[in-house]
Amino acid sequence: MFLLTIRSSFAAAHNLKNYQGDCENLHGHNWKVEVAVTARELDKAGLGIDFKILKREACAIINELDHKYINEIPPFLELSPSSEHIAKYLYGRISERLNNGNVTVDSITVWESDNASARYYE
């Protein structure tokens, strides 16, 4: 089994729901996103998945959040847009694009600052 990882980022605003403190107010982050996938086998070129393809497919979803107010994007109309929920959301959406029997999304880590992250995996 091989583990491949790419990093991307997006900037967006949000406010947490059902939270008592500063983060219930509108604010923004420059989020960093780490996408880790596993590959069972390598192709003829020795690749589990071409990093260009991995980045293109993952960023197609990540970029939907860029420069947005996350609270206005389903499912965050109802769900609090915490880093944990954003990581789970990206895991599901990116898995739809990438999982193919050989390649499977392993985990998504969302960093809201240099010192605070949330990781989702199944």
Image: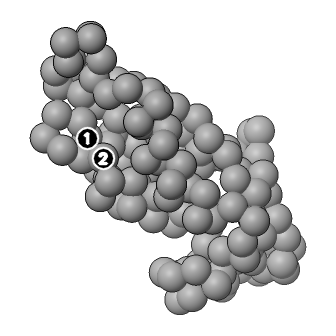
Report which quarter residue 84 is drawn in: bottom right
Tag 2 near tag 1, CB within 8 Å? yes
Can the viewer see residue 97 in this picture? yes
Q: Mark 2 points at which residue?
A: 98
Between 91 and 56, the residue placed more toward the observer is 56
**Element on which disc 2 rests:** helix
For badge 1, the amino acid type reads: Thr
Q: Which residue is drawn at 54% across and 39% down?
A: 34
Figure check: 23 above or below 107: below
Labels in figure, total: 2
Q: Where is residue 79 in the image (x, y as percent from the top left)?
A: 53, 81
Q: Which amino acid does label 2 sit on?
A: Leu
Residue 54, quarter of picture: top left
Compared across the picture, whether 52 is left or right of 66 comes to left
Residue 73 screen position, x and y as percent: 58, 80
Considering the image in quadrants, where does the N terminus appear?
top left
Q: Which of marks 2 and 1 is nearer the N terminus?
A: 2
Dot 2 alpha-carbon crowd within 10 angstroms: few under 14, some 14 to 19, many 20 or more: some
Left-right relation of 18 to 107: right
Q: Residues within 10 Å of mark 1 (few under 14, many from 20)?
A: some
Marks 2 and 1, how far apart in space?
A: 7 Å
Left/right of residue 39 with respect to residue 14 in the rendered view: left
Residue that appears at 32% across and 54% down: 97
Side (left or right) of 105 relative to 5: left
Q: Position of residue 70 (x, y in %)?
A: 66, 74
The residue lying at 53 percent from left, 49 percent from top is 59
Q: What element carries label 1?
A: strand
In the displayed orientation, state which residue is furthest to the bottom.
78
Query: According to the image, label 1 marks what residue?
Result: 104
